[in-house]
Image: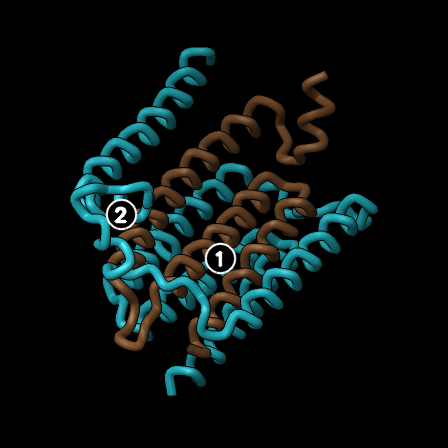
Amino acid sequence: MIEQQILQVTAAAMFFIGLAGMAVSRNLIKVIMSFQVVLFGVNLALFASGLGPLGPSLFSTTLLVLSISIGASVEALALSLTIFVYRHYGTLNPWEIRRLRH
Amino acid sequence: MTTALTIIFATLLIVVTLSALVIKRLVYSLIMLFFSGLLLGAIFLIYGASYAGLFQIITFAGAVSVMFMVILMLVGGELLSTGPRFSREQLVGCILAAAGFLVVAIILWQSTGSLVRIDEGTVTQGLGTFGNDPLTFLWSFRSWDVLFLIILVSATLAGIVSLFSKEASED
């Protein structure tokens, strides 16, 4: 099924784009945005793995909704931690934060 | 028809996502990320997963984008996300990510027709015994999802409230 392969490759691309973004970014907000992209990739892979001739399976859709909820919760917590870090250290640069800790 | 739509939406999704991470100004980056969430929801909707698609759009294109915007308003000044130079470590990270993608993409593209499909048939084989299959276990206890989600969201809320109440008491 060609659509499934296209979606799987797109999911892999999203995952690695997000991973590269997390490695490259020098701003915590951008790191969380990259994390969201990784999450999109994982969600798409989950969805594509359940695709069949009759459409997506109920099981993969259930897991997908669970994954979306967990992802949103994790992001909310990460963003609140970012605000906490910004008020404490006055910067969002991870390298700068590490320097200030020592 | 679906194949053409899939190709168009998948290409758009990658382009929009890539531009979201490349653009330096965080506000524009956030707008691109909003469109990325919207496109992903549209892909789910094309294939008939309307519940997951709408949930994706409401959660990521709606709630999470608003949350990001509030955070940007609070943080304010730091709009430049990356430094002026592209360091060697960053270059190595990008190359490793590209290499990883190439490997996974080749494996996926080669595996015509042999991709594992997660469906009810796969997971209901051992129903009742649970066996060693984690998918069977998950499928059997899927109604617990709601309970786990409530616990998860409550824990997140408690964590956020605790963080800010601690900070307020320190002030």
Q: Are marks 2 and 1 on the same chain?
A: no
**In this rendering, is residue B2 above or below A19?**
below
The answer to whether one can see residue B93 in this image is yes
Q: Residue shown at 46%/54% (left/top)? A: A42
Circle 2 sits on which residue?
Answer: B136
Along the line of sight, the residue nearer the viewer: B69 or B123: B123
In the image, taking residue B126 as reference, residue B32 lies left or right, namely right
Instruction: Report the label total.
Output: 2
Q: Residue shown at 60%/55% (left/top)? A: A16
Where on the picture, by quarter, is residue B151?
A: top left
Q: Position of residue B117 (x, y in %)?
A: 36, 63
In the image, taking residue B57 as reference, residue B148 lies left or right, namely left
Q: Return the chain for callout 1.
A: A
Q: Position of residue B145 (x, y in %)?
A: 23, 42
Q: Amino acid at mark 1?
A: Gly
Quadrant occupied by the N terminus of chain B: bottom left
Label 1 near label 2: C-beta < 8 Å? no
In the image, taking residue B99 as reference, residue B106 lies left or right, namely left
Rendering colour (chain B): cyan
Q: Residue shown at 20%/42% (left/top)? A: B129
Q: Amino acid at mark 2?
A: Thr
- Callout 2: 10 Å neighbours few (<14), some, many (20+)? many
